[in-house]
Amino acid sequence: MIKKYLSWGDFFDLLTPLQLLIKPDDIVFGVPKGGMIVSNFLTCKKTHDPTRATVIVDDIVDSGRTKKLHTDNFPLAKFMAVIDKQKKPDYDGYIVFPWEQAEEDAEHTVAKMIEHLGDNPNREGIIDTPKRVVKSWKTIYGGYNQTPEDVLKTSFNVDYDEMIISKDIEFYSTCEHHMLPFFGKAHIAYIPRANVVGLSKLSRLLEVYARRLQIQERLTNQIADGMMKVMNPLGCGVIIEAKHFCMVCRGVQKKNSTMITSAIRGLFKSAEVKNEFHRLCK
């Protein structure tokens, strides 16, 4: 399928007629996600609730499924799109909007890396590899889209003032120096001040920071600092044990080496609590 790449200039030229159709008293809802981007460039009142909208906008009408869904569910709102292929059949092929081209550029970069390694990025087994690699980044580096507040926002008031530990949480991260994996397990503990969080939340907090370009020392500190900031416990402790591919498959090539880091905050700095934490983690 032929791809047509729109520049920002092309986009704004197409946006102008849409803007002229919107009246001062209209309330606009942008269809996620392309329509939300379009609505940001429109001078109008906006809403995140489609039931309040008088106009629903999207970036493109292609098969018409999205348009039908919204016109069926919200019949009182007018549906508009920057490009409506049903009205402008000359816009055939695959339309790539300016905000989508960053992903296209990333795929091109991966293809150039494959070429630099000495392989042919167009051969059968590799031709779709750039697309797969860029898609995998959404998981591998998904931590950039989350914060500790996102995963620790729900807590429960429980009368409990002893140590809570989640042990042997497996994780995968990426070394920021060589972009090679390091992986292992983490032990995360805290003593609540008033509220506790669900057990899975400690694993999710680990993922927030592990799913980024990292070094193990920073990862350990970030988990401890994130707990102290959001949960406000009496204290917390984090121990991480990991193997690093940058040490296993390159450099000194010591395949059995393991790195251990720890971070303690609050009451965990006392020798008694620290010793209990280390003993229970063994």
Image: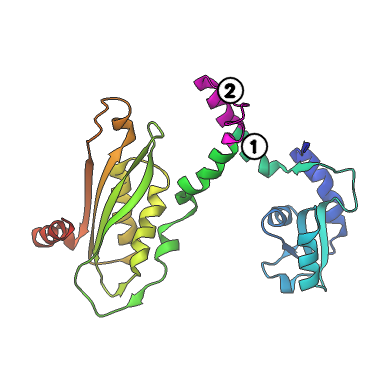
Relative horizontal placement of residue 216, taking residue 273 as reference (left or right): right
Note whether 248 is above or below 83 in the view shown: above
What kind of residue is marked 1? Answer: Glu
Q: How would you rate the neighbour count of disc 2 (Cα within 10 Å): few for under 14, some for 14-19, many for 20 or more? A: some
| Residue drawn at point x = 67 percent, y = 55 percent | 33
Task: Please rate how many residues cluster around mark 1, counting C-alpha atoms within 10 Å: few if below 14, some from 14 to 19, many from 20.
Answer: some
Instruction: Tell me the SS state at disc 2.
Output: loop
- Give the residues drawn in magenta, as a range: 108-130
Closest to the observer, 93 or 73: 93
Label 2 vs label 1: CA separation?
19 Å
Q: Residue 275 carries which label?
A: none
Residue furthest out toward the front: 124
Number of numbered discs: 2
Camera-nearest residue between 44 and 52? 52
| Relative to 155, residue 264 above or below | above
Residue under pointer 1: 104
The residue beneath circle 2 is 120
Is residue 43 in sight in this rendering?
no
> Which image quadrant: the N terminus?
top right
Asked whether residue 234 is drawn in magenta, I would say no
Q: How is the image coloured?
A: rainbow
Closest to the observer: 208 or 269? 208
User: Is the C terminus in the top left, top right, bottom left or bottom right quadrant?
Assistant: bottom left
